[in-house]
Amino acid sequence: MKDSGFYFVQMSDAHLLGKPSQEIHSVRPAHNLRAAVQYINSLNPLPEFCIHTGDSVSEESDKAYLLFKEEVASLKMPTYFAIGNHENRASFRKWVLTATSPDDAPYYYDFELQGWHFIVLDSSDPGNISGRIDDAQLLWLEQTLQHHPNLPTFVFLHHHPLPLGIPWLDKLMLQDAAPLIDVLRRAPGVQRVFFGHVHHECHFSLDKLHFASVPALSFQFSEIAGTEKFSSLPPGFRLVHVQGEIIRTLVHRRMKPILSDSNLRS
């Protein structure tokens, strides 16, 4: 029987506000998230999992976190999360992860699926828009990769670890990224690094490492230096299909219209 492989979804930067009807940069983020969830749930077969790579909210409020939690809870597959610069770790743990004793420690972890290794890093740097990965997390990453030397690996984080050539965005990238890049380059199993934060789609490579961002579920930034900061492109998410050694990715922007938002609180 031919191996059909598996696939998963990466989405990012939902940027929800406390009320579903609220707009930010002429976009209603809660409605975009609901449309994405509805579309993902309509896929056949369903993805193995969905991961949101940071910035679930735009405002630090219980209502915003709860709204995000309510919408992603409708997904029909397991959902994973990375922490972005707009999140407070303790609040995210309390309202989204429903932790009984939420704290503000960095939130990073790994899991395995169908012979693949998935690593989720915490690049948030509390108090800053730019990112940082501390020495303890970097040591954990190196040890985790060493413990899985034969597994092909995907890595997820919020901030971009290499410059994009867009000056204002590159000021907000992962700071002191060289040690992270060094660890990833030395790990033979690392196949792809996926991130959010930049609110547009991009791809670039460094030796054997391949990096890719995903459009935001909310408002979009221009991917061209020297142009207007915001783009009129629609929101989107990424489908990643793995079949043997072949990895295909597709950014999907045309989501189904919301079937009903009558139960979205105003």
Image: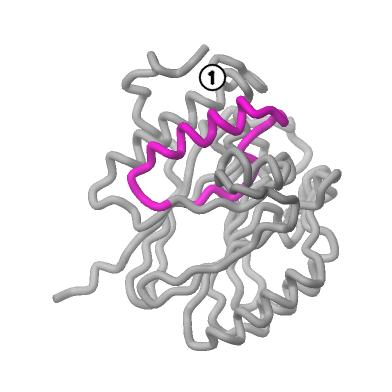
Residue 252 or 28: which is nearer the viewer? 28
Residue 10 or 49: which is nearer the viewer? 49
Q: Position of residue 206 (x, y in %)?
A: 66, 72
Tell whether 20 sits left or right of 113. right
- The residue indicated by pointer 1 is 20
Q: Position of residue 28 (x, y in %)?
A: 56, 21
Q: Is 140 covered by the magenta stretch? A: no
- The image quadrant of residue 174 is bottom right
Q: Specify the farthest residue to the left.
A: 1
Residue at 80%, 59% (x, y): give it: 132
Residue at 71%, 79% (x, y): give it: 183
Residue 39 or 59: which is nearer the viewer? 59
Looking at the image, is 91 positioned above or below residue 101? above
Residue 95 or 23: which is nearer the viewer? 95
Looking at the image, is 189 positioned above or below residue 27? below
Q: Secondary structure at mark 1?
A: loop
Q: Is 57 covered by the magenta stretch? A: yes
Q: Specify the farthest residue to the front.
A: 100
Residue at 45%, 50% (x, y): give it: 79
Say what amino acid the circle numbered 1 marks. Pro
Tell whether 256 sits left or right of 22. left
Looking at the image, is 82 positioned above or below residue 136? above
Tell whether 42 sits left or right of 126. left
Q: Position of residue 97 (x, y in %)?
A: 56, 46
Provide the residue span drawn in magenta.
51-78
Q: Position of residue 218 (x, y in %)?
A: 58, 32
Residue at 58%, 18% (x, y): give it: 19
Badge 1 crowding class, 10 Å Cα cut-off, few under 14, some 14 to 19, many 20 or more, is many
